[in-house]
Image: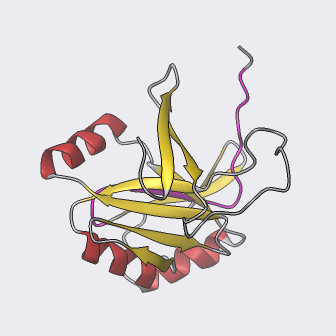
Amino acid sequence: MQTPYMNVCEMTDPYGNVTGICHEKCNSLFYTPAPGPVSPMFHRILAVFLPVRDLESSIRWYTNTLGFELVNHWGQGADLKIGKGETIVTMIVMDEETHRQALQRLNGQAYYSLQTSSIHEAYRQLSQLGVPAESCREQDGVNRFHICSPEGFIIRISERELIQVVSI
């Protein structure tokens, strides 16, 4: 897909996980010119795409509750910065059926993970804001808990995340 600001493609791994790859054009808010070839080919995740039904309500929840910062709003979508801006959450309005299918495909799994340097403080702050959260627990050496967005997506909060590398 091509837009005035970026070229976008998606890849699906053997487990059904979809990864979007965006090439930001020079007129994009997030364009950063590289002085030459970037090695390795990819060096960070720029955006996590989040399907939403109610964009304005979702923006309010993510900014007021999780502390994300709104950086771009284009009507049917919005970009929110996480932390120092290493990753952007791109919200895109979806119709009810598409949104329902996205939730159903997750089958109760977390849509994405957020990392914190203080899991118990994050849990306390979210609890004080009235965000329902399961108890904080340790699993496989990782302290974590889950919350649910108003749109129904499960979000994992962890102090550190173990990454399993599988050779092909």
**Image quadrant of residue 158?**
bottom right
Which contiguous range is marked in magenta?
A: 150-166
For the N terminus, give its image quadrant. top left
Residue 62 horizontal side relative to residue 48, left or right:
left
Tell me residue 37's x, y (percent): 83, 44
Inspect the magenta stretch and tell me whether residue 155 lies in it: yes
- Residue at 64 percent across and 74 percent down: it is 83
The answer to which of 19 and 154 lies nearer the viewer is 19
- Residue depicted at 72% across the width and 42% down the height: 42
Horizontal and vertical percent position of residue 116: 66, 68
Q: Main secondary structure of the magenta part?
A: loop
Instruction: Give the vertical position of 143 relative to 131 (above or below).
Output: above
Left or right: 166, with 150 as reference point: right
Which part of the image, by quadrant, shows the C terminus? top right
The image shows residue 28, relative to residue 130, as above or below, that is above
Image coords of residue 149 (percent x, y): 35, 64
- 60 relative to 146 in the view: left or right: left
Q: Is residue 18 visible?
A: no
> Could you say which quadrant of the image residue 164 lies in?
top right
Residue drawn at x 55%, y 64% as measured from the top left: 88
The foreground one among 138 and 47 is: 47
Is 102 contained in the magenta span?
no
Percent across and percent down for residue 156 are 51, 55
